[in-house]
Image: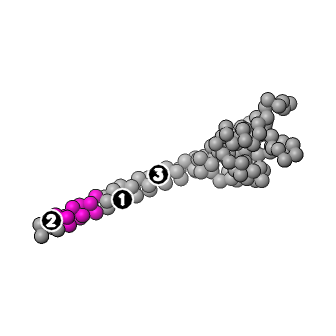
Amino acid sequence: MTTNEDLMTIREMCDSFEVTPRTLRFYEAKELLFPIRDGQKRLFTRQDRGRLKLILRGKRFGFSLEDIRQLLDMYDRSGVQTEQLARTVEKARERLAQMERQQAELGEAIAELRDQLSWGEQELARAASRDAAQ
């Protein structure tokens, strides 16, 4: 049973989760959140808050909305769904491997840019030396 104390307005949700009303409406349109409609007002339950936490976490980890939907489906079901849990773990492993590859690529790009920057600074110093000697 939902009590008024369990409900949050869209403004309260925005303030609590540091998101915009547009973001909440987007997730509602994508059927990831299901607020109670009271006229023009949207009232969010504890379940909505839990779902939003998972959505934001999934986004932070770089999961697609479909991946997030699958995670939410697992979260909503009572009891453990072994097959669904195994798929979730598999997707998480895939995402982690992808993020680790991106991290390695970024590390290489940063090192290369540092080398190029160092070379450029040395060339500028040599040019300044030559100009000063003339």
Q: Is residue 127 magenta?
A: yes
Q: Secondary structure at mark 2?
A: helix
Q: Position of residue 68 (x, y in %)?
A: 68, 48
Answer yes or no: do the residues labelled 1 and 2 have beta carbons within 8 Å?
no
Q: Position of residue 16 (x, y in %)?
A: 67, 37
Task: Give the magenta range.
Answer: 118-129
At label 2, the amino acid type is: Ala
Q: Is residue 119 above or below residue 36?
A: below
> Counting other residues with Cα less than 10 Å from the Cα at mark 1, is it few (<14), some (14-19), or many (20 or more)?
few
At label 3, the amino acid type is: Gln
Disc sitting over residue 132 in the figure? 2
3 or 2: mark nearer the eye:
2
> Counting other residues with Cα less than 10 Å from the Cα at mark 3, is it few (<14), some (14-19), or many (20 or more)?
few
Answer yes or no: do the residues labelled 1 and 3 have beta carbons within 8 Å?
no
Upstream in the sequence, badge 1 or badge 3? 3
Q: Which residue is mark 1?
A: 113
Q: Which residue is mark 3?
A: 103
Can residue 85 be seen?
no
Locate the N terminus and report the quarter of the image it occupies.
top right
Q: Secondary structure at mark 1?
A: helix
Q: Residue at x 49, y 54 (%)?
A: 102
Between the residue at mark 1 and the residue at mark 2, the CA separation in whole angstroms equals 28 Å
At label 1, the amino acid type is: Leu
Q: Residue at x 44, y 56 (%)?
A: 105
Q: Position of residue 47 (x, y in %)?
A: 76, 37
Can residue 43 be seen?
yes
1 or 2: mark nearer the eye:
2
